[in-house]
Image: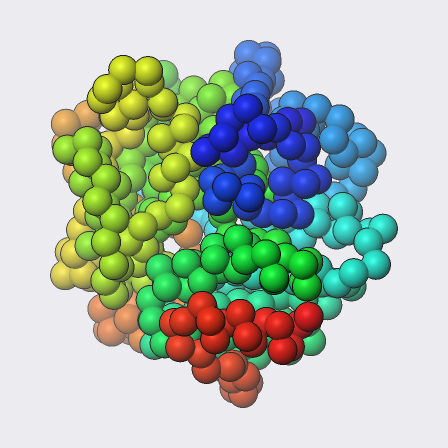
Amino acid sequence: MKLYSTKQKDALTGLKEAVMKGLPDDNGLYMPLEIPRLPASFIRNLGGYSFREIAFHICRALFKGAVPEDDLEELIGRAVNFPAPVVQLDDDKYVLELFHGPSLAFKDFGARFMAQLMSYFNREESRELVILVATSGDTGGAVAAGFLQTPGVKVVILYPSGKVSMLQEKQLTTLGHNILALEVDGTFDDCQEMVKKAFLDKELAGSIRLTSANSINISRLIPQTFYYFEAYKQLPDDGRPVVFSVPSGNFGNLTAGLMAQRMGLPVHHFIAATNANDVVPGYLESGLFNPRPSVRTLSNAMDVGNPSNFARMLDLYEGKEEGSTWNNMRKFISGYAFDDEQTRAAVAEISRRYNYTIDPHGAVGFLALEQYQKAHSNTKGVVLETAHPAKFLDEVEGILGREVAVPGRLAALAGREKEAVWMPADFGGFKEWLLGNLA
């Protein structure tokens, strides 16, 4: 498998280097040189494949021998070991539940796969690998769970102070062992910028083996394609076009869906659903990308003002003429944004109408699908429910006026003591801490 940087397409690298480095030296993002189209027979017969078998076929086509097939099967078997069920709300709307993994969030799929792939590539290295990850809520917990007690690996998680839920924070700060949490006095965008600068710093590169676990790492993105195929196979075959509504923050989830479509999955359209951090819906409407500082919302994992994976989206739809990239993208993606008041109303309405408890992020996805289907009533829509509602317990219980059941593995964290290092949103201080503690 060969990959290029979104900023320098003629400089190719292999899968191992792309996974272990995380970011190219030019601060672009790695993309596959070829996104292979899977056989039509495979797509027609998706219902005959298990989730693991689907994952294997996708990886085999993408990796092109970069990982031997026997090793790949073992790796996938350890990573893809929980389901992604589709729940029907009505004749037109379905929910893809992506919260059945260890951290109760969709990012478990990417984090567990990445942990297995990195461990595979790292098995002959003598130096410790340090994984840096910025989180707006769910990424950190998934990465922590995926890499917990992995030999030869330390994980450093940067999260914005006061901007994640209590249970999300417990998932980042109570595991110990090889998991270190930094509580940053700033926003997610500040955390992400500090991580990016670390990868470009020559002194750090010479002292510490660094890599990334955000969706900027291609090994996080690839496994997110798996569950689009898994969802599609569970839908009734009634001939109607299928659309996916994707609650979006850093846009790795949506980018993975676009890659699945390129691989042959017959998705009619994607919906980019955001909260007040609506720079991508703004771009889809105007053709202008105007990143700005993120604002805090009820759906905190989507509080991203400058989404990294937008560069990959542009790359997928790049056109040679002025404005053509924008026009190409709009053929396949529509964008909608909703505020907290609308989100709260949607959580309550979905509970009343369908007897289904949805989290705030999924509620934004539902609102976007509902809006899209007003003009496209012949479609069959799937909302990605990206996290268990219990991760936002106070908010959801306050909206519904009743208790929400908390899974045991999440409830067990509530009584654990938080351990985190306070840090200003300053790269100099972050670099000094890295050199002082990990070099």
Of residue 421 and residue 92, the one placed in the foreground of this image is 421
Of residue 234 and residue 30, the one placed in the foreground of this image is 30
Height in image: 122 above or below 45? below
Identify the residue at image location x=18%, y=40%: 282
Q: Position of residue 321 (x, y in %)?
A: 27, 15
Q: Tell me, yes or no, if residue 379 can be seen here.
A: no
Identify the residue at image location x=63%, y=78%: 436
Direction from residue 362 to residue 234 in the image, left or right:
right
Q: Position of residue 247 (x, y in %)?
A: 33, 47
Q: Tell me, yes or no, if residue 396 can be seen here.
A: yes
Direction from residue 289 to residue 32 in the image, left or right:
right
Identify the residue at image location x=14%, y=61%: 341
Q: Position of residue 178 (x, y in %)?
A: 68, 71
Identify the residue at image location x=73%, y=68%: 149
Direction from residue 180 to residue 301 in the image, left or right:
left
Quadrant for the C terminus, please: bottom right
Name the residue at the top extreme. Answer: 40
Height in image: 165 above or below 259? below
Quadrant for the N terminus, please: top right
Q: Position of residue 290 (x, y in %)?
A: 21, 44
